[in-house]
Structures are given as C-alpha cells and as structure tokens.
Image (cartoon, rainbow, N blue to C red):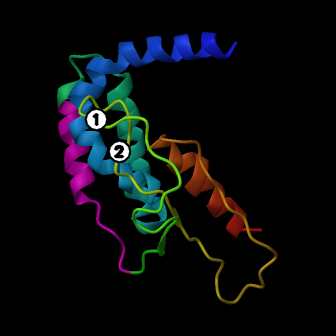
Amino acid sequence: MASELAKRMEEMMKKMAHIRKEFGPAKMPAVEIFESAPCYDEKKVAELTKLCNKVQNCTDEERPPLIEEFIKLRDSIHMKEDAPRRIELWPEGKIPTETVYTDNSDYRYHHNPDFRPYLVEMLIPADRTPKGAVVLCPGGDHAEACVCEGYQSAKEFLTL
C-alpha cells in the first residue's frame, strides 16, 4: 500500500514539474506568507491562497498572466505591525534531523534545505480566561494549505 501511494505521488510530481518550474520562482517567496498567515492581512492572504490554487489548476495558456497577478498581490502583502511572535523550534545548527535533499532548484519542495521549523503564536484576547492550550501542526511542506489547515482552525479555537 505504501509503495503504491509513493508511486502515485511520484507520478503526480512528474505531472506538476512544468508548473513548478514556471510558478516556483513566484510562489517560493509567498510560502512564508502562507505559513505565517496570522502575521499578515487576512483578506489578502486568503486572496493570495485562492490565486495560488487558480495558477496551479489553470491551463498552460492562462498561467502567465495569473502568475503576474500573483506576484503583484504577493508583493503588496506586508507583515502587520502587531504581528504575532514567530517561535523557532530549535536554535540554529541544533535541528535534530537533516533534510534529505540538498538542492531545490526544481521547486519540488516548498522549503529550501536550510529551512528552520517554527510556530506562530495566536493568543486569546487578554480579557478572556484560558481554558487550555492547543498546538496545531498543519501537514508538512504544504505552503498555502497552512492557511486553511492551521490558521483557520486556530481562529475557530479562539472563539471557544
């Protein structure tokens, strides 16, 4: 079963190679925006996420102008002045594992080999009594999926 899944994943990666090559240089700088969504304007991050999915699922002819639109929107998004704190999980040089790849020039992964894992805190309002704590870890190497898998879920927990 696992090897069948690995084969299917590899087939999908081959099919997506031309899209990664064309869109990768524009998407890579946006990964931090997706993964640190609470630090940026929520509406713009949602718009960028939708546009990212559109770029990845359109025809080859539709893609170039959509990539240009993506770059303009990406470049208009700036960190909020009161952005939540980013917490590095390990000090530099102390990560307990190594990445299995050393080159990401084909944009196969959303992170370069020197990526350092981190969390973004989302605290409850000061006037609320804490009821516990939750750590959300959306997938792995999913970039724009962090917006719906992590950020949106964290927002829902804050309403409890």
Estimate the x, y position of residue 59 in percent, counting from the top left.
29, 16
Q: Which residues are magenta?
A: 65-81
SS of the residue at dot 1?
A: loop
Q: Of marks 2 and 1, which one's residue comes earlier in the chain?
A: 1
Residue 90 vs 69, above or below: the answer is below
Q: Amino acid at mark 1?
A: Asp
Which residue occupies 36% across, 27% down? Answer: 56
Overall secondary structure of the magenta stretch?
helix
Query: Dot 1 corresponds to which residue?
Result: 103
Are circles 2 and 1 on residues that touch, CB within 8 Å? yes
Which residue occupies 37% across, 56% down? Answer: 33
- How far is disc 2 from disc 1 in space, using C-alphas? 7 Å
The mark tally for this picture is 2
Estimate the x, y position of residue 146 in percent, counting from the top left.
52, 48
Camera-nearest residue between 105 and 28: 105
Locate the N terminus by quadrant. Answer: top right
Camera-nearest residue between 147 and 32: 32
In the rendered image, the residue lying farthest to the bottom is 127
Q: Amino acid at mark 2?
A: Pro
Which residue occupies 59% across, 53% down? Answer: 150
Residue 121 vs 82, above or below: the answer is above
Query: Dot 2 corresponds to which residue?
Result: 113
Q: Say whether residue 80 is magenta.
A: yes
Q: Is residue 98 left or right of residue 112?
A: right
Q: Badge 1, how many Cα within 10 Å: few under 14, some, many 20+?
A: few
Among the 4 quarters of the image, the one containing residue 42: bottom left
SS of the residue at dot 2?
A: loop
Residue 66 vs 77, above or below: the answer is above
